[in-house]
Image: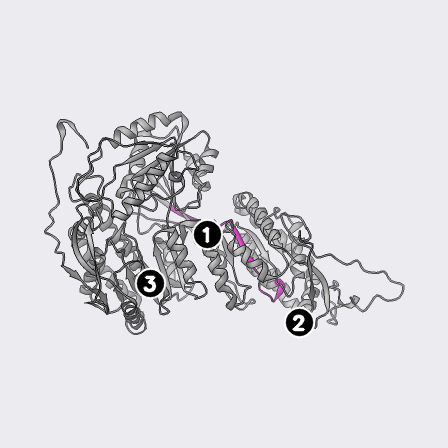
Amino acid sequence: MPDRARPTPTPRGRTKGPAVRPPVPDGTRVDVRKTYKLFIGGAFPRSESGRSYPATGPDGTVLAHAARASRKDARDAVVAARKAVPGWSGATAYNRGQVLYRVAELLEGRAAQFTAECVQGEGVSWAGAERTVTAAIDRWVWYAGWPDKVAQVAGSANPVAGPYFNFSVPEPTGVVAVVAPAAPSLLGLVSVLAPVIATGNAAVVVASEAAPLPAVTLAEVLATSDVPPGVVNILTGYTAELAPVLAAHMDVNAIDLTGVAAGGRAELERLAARNVKRVFAADGDWEAPPGTARMLAFLEIKTVWHPIGI
Amino acid sequence: MAGGSWEYAPAPEARDIVTIRREYGLFLAGEFVPPAAGESFTTLNPASEEPLAQVAAAGAADVDRAVTAARDAFERTWGQLPGRERAKYLYRIARAIAERAREFAVLESLDNGKPIKESRDVDVPLAAAHFFYHAGWADKLEYAGYGPGPRPIGVAGQVIPWNFPLLMAAWKLAPALATGNTCVLKPAETTPLTALLLAEVIAEAGLPPGTVNVITGDGSTGAELVRHPGVAKIAFTGSTEVGKQIQAAIAGTGKRLTLELGGKAANVVFDDAPLDQAVEGIVNGIFFNQGHVCCAGSRLLIQESVADTVLSRLKRRLATLRLGDPLDKNTDIGAINSREQLDKITGLVAAGEAEGAQRWSPPCQLPAKGFWFPPTVFTGVSQSHRIAREEIFGPVLSVLTFRTPEEAVAKANNTPYGLSAGVWTEKGSRILWMAQRLRAGVIWANTYNRFDPASPFGGYTESGFGREGGRAGLAAYLDA
């Protein structure tokens, strides 16, 4: 594999140039390559199947061999996510907001690395990649502010016709499977993942099959930023292999099929009906303001009644 | 069943307030028309098995006519009306239901078998209230929090159950119409009459033809409606099994869907609860409407230290319930809605006995004709018993016990359903602690089975998705 194809960090603010450095010059050190693994329950295992697949640039250049998650990896990820639900959904909204904001801080520090990975994986220009990466970071900051506000926007006090105090609050749906869009690989991923966890759910994400590397790097950020293990689990591999497992899984409460081409959604929706999963899919302009639809899709409204009396 | 010297004299509600036609057509494009294939079915009074009327059975051609009429109304008339005009039509419907309240109540009790005091005091007033509440939303949708200029979806196909026939029609139609959609409503096969009377009210209220269409029939009519490509949104209330079939059937079509499905609610009584009130709540929770309630408190969880006390008071209270003529104003327990449902209840009760739970009913004489089942309590129930896991949809209570609040939560949540739950305790912090942990869409604390158009209703997990009522309920009918 040619060295020029490695995703190499490029300092931000540098003059725009080739996204990658030239081959190692004489007498300088050999760079340390990264193994791209899965992210399950806060750990970075290889696929239990021992499989990988080449993640390539648009020109076919092999960038790395990403783990090719198996059905069992997907099920393990669901177990990890389920285990994380009580702690994460039970954390105070303020705490969740702070944890998510911490993620944004670390994303900022890795901006150049993400940009390089997007350039290599998607074949976009450095400037184009940088724009989507900064948009992704800004979007994460936007969602970091939501945990302690969404209940005020989506909840209500309900004036019922009787001596009762009645209120409605949104609660997380539980374990949400997410098929991330193919591109833009980081902005698309952040746009579908952040609303799921900002609302207190735990996520099992199938990363972009074509450009999985930024997702693994995002996992490294999540692993070092106080997000409890299992709240986000990231699988790389073949969408066609993983999505049906998650759509049919009886302990997954909802699924976001945004990353599945429209023609492929019907069968997954059929599988999702087995346990009445909430199904969401929305295609759109990733750089446009996201609105609240993605958060509301993974919230349940709970209404509590209590008599008023002395 | 209340014996002794204080026997009640019969107090039947007058039946002649309502005129039941011998035959009913389909309500399509503003008028009653015969079905294309000319087929019909009989709707019975479940309390006497007396035939009430022949009702049209809508086939594929009728469904298509209904959807086409609704589509036309959406594109040309109702869909073009400003919200303030839609509002006035809905206010008219609300007022008309109230004006004809007794007629609706008697007809509901005749066709469904529920006690007149419930149809009179719960179903009908709530149906009117539902139209009144949503009427006011019609011209205020931009303030509902779903973004600027929220738009309707199109033709809503609405399939409703037999347990609250008129009220479920109101829950479906009122929000759909307020938001500017048009409707094709499919009432349950065993209880079509109040929806057809509501169609008359809607026609008299002058809504543009096709805005609301009522197609009667069995499950196959509902399936045709769900499949019809002209339907943009499906709203279904009924069993989880059918809900799953609908969700699978519309996979990949892009149709919007809300489901209000089954339940197996826990009603949790702590040792510090106001026990007499709790007993009333338990009775209301499971014996209201013969237990034909998706949110019925069908699993009673009693803290061990008060289990004997609660059970003995509960049994004493159940012995005072009066089962019999649904039209009698003193009747507490009416008829089971159909032979099919009676068979289902009987089968599950037999399974409860076979699995080793102890069955108890108060002394109770069942009428010779009609479909009846006595109030029944099972003790010694374990979580694995079918009567603790499956929705019985009848007057059958399964009693379990617990020691700690954690155990109560674990047992309450040990179900694929998540529609509702009850909590009884005098300790405020414990109510909120429980309310936070119970995985259900409606939590009744120190009360049970309360409903209001302003209060969102709907389930978690396999009890469905989407809400009906309140601001939250509007989302089901808005393209936001």
Residue depth check, mark 3 versus mark 2: number of the one nearer the observer: 3
- Disc assigned to residue A124: 2
Q: Are marks 2 and 1 in contact (CB under 8 Å)?
A: no
The N terminus of chain B is located in which quarter? top left
Q: Are marks 1 and 3 on the same chain?
A: no
Q: Are marks 3 and 2 in contact (CB under 8 Å)?
A: no
In depth, the one of B393 and A162 nearer the eye is B393
Q: At which x and y percent is residue A176?
A: 53, 53
Q: Secondary structure at mark 3?
A: strand
Residue A295 visible in rendering:
yes
Image: magenta residue range: A167-186
Residue indicated by mark 1: A275
Give the Cα distance between marks 2 and 1: 40 Å
Q: Secondary structure at mark 2?
A: loop
Q: Quadrant of residue B381?
A: top left
In depth, the one of B30 and A52 nearer the eye is A52
Give the Cα distance between marks 1 and 3: 22 Å
In depth, the one of A223 and A174 nearer the eye is A174
- List the single residue furthest toward the right: A27
Q: Is residue B339 magenta?
A: no
**Of callouts 2 and 1, the N-terminal one:** 2
Q: At which x and y percent is residue B175?
A: 32, 59
The C terminus of chain B is located in which quarter? bottom left
Residue A101 visible in rendering:
no
Residue indicated by mark 3: B157
